Every structure is written in structure tokens, then in C-alpha cells.
Amino acid sequence: MKRLALLSLLLLAGCDLSMTQQKKYDTYSPAALWSDGTSARPLPEHVVAQGDLARGRQEADPPPVTAALLKRGQERFNVDCSPCHGLDGKGDGIVAERGFPHPPSYFDARLMAAPASEFYDAISQGYGVMYSYAARVEPRDRWAIVAYIRALQLSQNATVAMAPEAREKLP
């Protein structure tokens, strides 16, 4: 019985140690232990963060354009993009109206001819004064937004010849 009490006492005494009380280097503090003198260590070669390969495949392969993808793109565009770009994509959103620099209209000739990957990269990495949305918008949603931007662009110059089934629906 005494042995059990002594063992319990020793175990409980060890619980008081905290990771915050251990010797450690603060982030970016100097460290004589390493030849370069810094505590921040570079990643080993060929290291890939968990989930990066799957994310990379999503970024490289745009999904097929469907009505559901366009609907999701419109939803995400309205939430994430319209404050600056406006609901119609002309660069006249409420943020721009309040003095922030106006983004270019999606209907500029340069952006009409731009590849879809340019829009995807702008969402992922930022462009000009626009910061990156990579942490806020998942890769699949980025492609959905790009598909919706393309739909906006096509809608500006649409003709009945492009959608003959719409002829019967026109007044």
C-alpha cells in the first residue's frame, strides 16, 4: 500500500511541469547550436505539407462547368468579390465607392481575353491592391467563381444566336 501511495505521489509531482517552463528557443531567436546561428530551421528537402498534393490537384484541374458550379460561383462571388468588383463585375462595388481603388472591369478587353487561370491566380495570390483569398476561398470555390466571372463576361455580349433555345422565351 505504501508503494502505491509513493508511486501516486511521484506521478502527481510530475504533472506540475509545464511545456512553458522548459528550455526552448523563441521564434527567430539566435541559437549557437546551429552553424547559421538561427533557431528557425529550414524544411528538409522534398517535404510536402499534409493535404498539399490533393490541393495541388484541385488547383491544376478545374471542374466541369455545370449549373450547380455556376450557382455556387455566383454565391461565392456575391460574398467575397462583389464588395469591390460589384455585383455585375464592373469594378464599382461599395468598397470602391467608399474611396478604395477601383478594380478593373471584367469587361475590359484584356480581361475578356485573359485565361481562366489568371483569375484563379489572382484569387489565390492576390493582384495589385487585392490581397490573397487563398485562406478564405477553397480551390473548388475559386474555380466556381472563375466560371461565374466567365458567365458574367459572356452575358454582356450574348446574342440569340449563341442560345437559340432562348428565342421562344423572348417577348
Image (cartoon, helix red, strand yellow):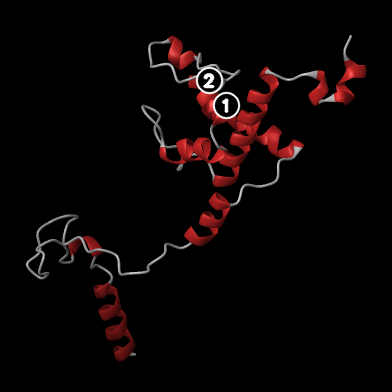
Farthest residue in the right direction?
Answer: 168
Q: Residues within 10 Å of mark 2 (few under 14, many from 20)?
A: few
Report the residue marked by disc 1.
112
Q: Quadrant of the N terminus?
A: bottom left
Report the residue marked by disc 2.
108
Task: Judge left or right: residue 1 versus residue 69.
Answer: left
Farthest residue in the left direction?
Answer: 32
Q: Are marks 2 and 1 in contact (CB under 8 Å)?
A: yes
Amino acid type of disc 2?
Asp
Cα–Cα gap, marks 2 and 1: 6 Å
170 over 70 or under it: above or below: above
* Quadrant of the rendered image containing residue 11: bottom left
Q: Secondary structure at mark 2?
A: loop
Residue 154 percent coordinates (x, y): 68, 25
21 over 79 or under it: above or below: below
Task: Judge left or right: residue 37 versus residue 97.
Answer: left
Residue 28 percent coordinates (x, y): 16, 55
* Quadrant of the rendered image containing residue 144: top right
Residue 93 percent coordinates (x, y): 51, 15
Amino acid type of disc 1?
Met
* Residue shown at the point (43%, 16%) measured from the top left: 102
Residue closer to the observer: 142 or 62: 62
The numbered mark at residue 85 is none
Q: Quadrant of the C terminus?
A: top right
Q: What number of labels is visible?
A: 2
* Quadrant of the rendered image containing residue 96: top left
Task: Judge left or right: residue 103 versus residue 27.
Answer: right
Q: Secondary structure at mark 1?
A: helix
* Residue shown at the point (15%, 66%) measured from the top left: 23
* Residue shown at the point (52%, 19%) measured from the top left: 105
